[in-house]
Image: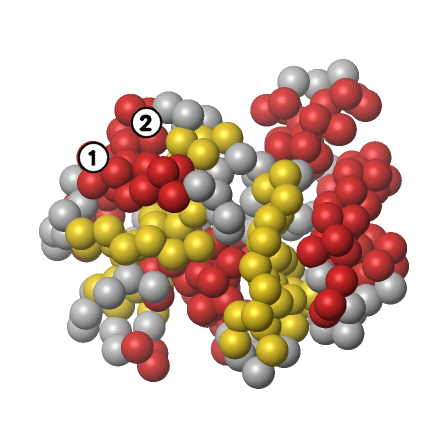
Amino acid sequence: MSGVEDLLHRAAERLDSAEPGDAVGPLQVGVDLGTASCVLTVLAGPDDDLRPVWVGRESSGALRDGVVVDFARAAATIGRLKQAAEDALGVTLEATATAYPPCVPLADARACRFVCEAAGFDRVDLVDEVTAAQRTLQVVDGVVVDVGGGSTGVGVFRRGELVALDDRPGGGHHLDLVLAGALGLSLSDAEAHKRTHPRQSLPILVPGLQRIAENVRALTVEAADLPLHLAGGALMIDGAGAVLSTYLERTVVTYPHALLITPLGIARSAS
């Protein structure tokens, strides 16, 4: 098991457990303000051995395509997650990092900071979602594709340096729309069906996945030689990576618990 996979498995264990880890050493906190859900992650230890000690998630409808559309709801959601983490760890969390989709206007990026401040954090660092994902994956030569609920962010890395960054609308929400329309389900039921019946859902979702693939193609014209590394919860469907790989005729690398790649990287970005 690679170091990245081990980290993701340990974070997933914290997400599914009410028991916190041992919060020894400096703490780093990350807030992922997602379209589908908000995730708060706490890491402990030195930079070369950061360990997930608390991971919490709550459904969210306060953001759309990475933009805060219900400030009060977003702040309340993060406030509850912050309080739960503090109660579990027996500490006060004063600082965090949070992330925004690549290329959103500065005012929208700052709104993510203001949400965290309203939730009770005194200091808030900002990082774009693709750079955060890279801090978990440590891709040297490759393309990091962060598929969220509302958009797909793409970062091209060569020799470990970010050389291109962009995003396009289209993500998990749009896949849910395809599935809801095909099966006559509500959006929330479509999301649940996608998770509980991935094998039956995948054939219906192929056109939506190909749309995401076309977005990636358009944003990586100068990087067609590089493999794609998939992050984000939207493509956590068995076979989704293979659909993109076949359609684009490119190597696609997938990871377990990909939903947690960006939240972990956000926490690693906290000062």
**2 and 1 marks in contact (CB < 8 Å):** yes
- Percent position of residue 36, x then y: 51, 35
Residue type highlighted by circle 1: Ala
- Residue drawn at x 36%, y 38% is 107
Total marks placed: 2
Residue matched to label 1? 118
Compared to 230, does 103 lie above or below? above
Name the one closer to the observer, 9 or 25. Answer: 25
- Percent position of residue 245, x then y: 81, 61
Q: Secondary structure at mark 1?
A: helix
- Residue drawn at x 25%, y 74% is 45
Q: Secondary structure at mark 2?
A: helix
Instruction: Quarter of the image for the C terminus: give it.
Output: bottom left
The answer to whether residue 11 shows anywhere in this view is no
Residue type highlighted by circle 2: Phe
Checking the image for residue 161, the label placed there is none
Residue matched to label 2? 71
Name the one closer to the observer, 48 or 110. Answer: 110
Name the quadrant containing residue 253. Answer: bottom right
The answer to whether residue 141 shows anywhere in this view is yes
Local crowd at mark 1 within 10 Å, few (<14), some, or many (≥20)?
Answer: some
- Residue drawn at x 16%, y 40% is 120
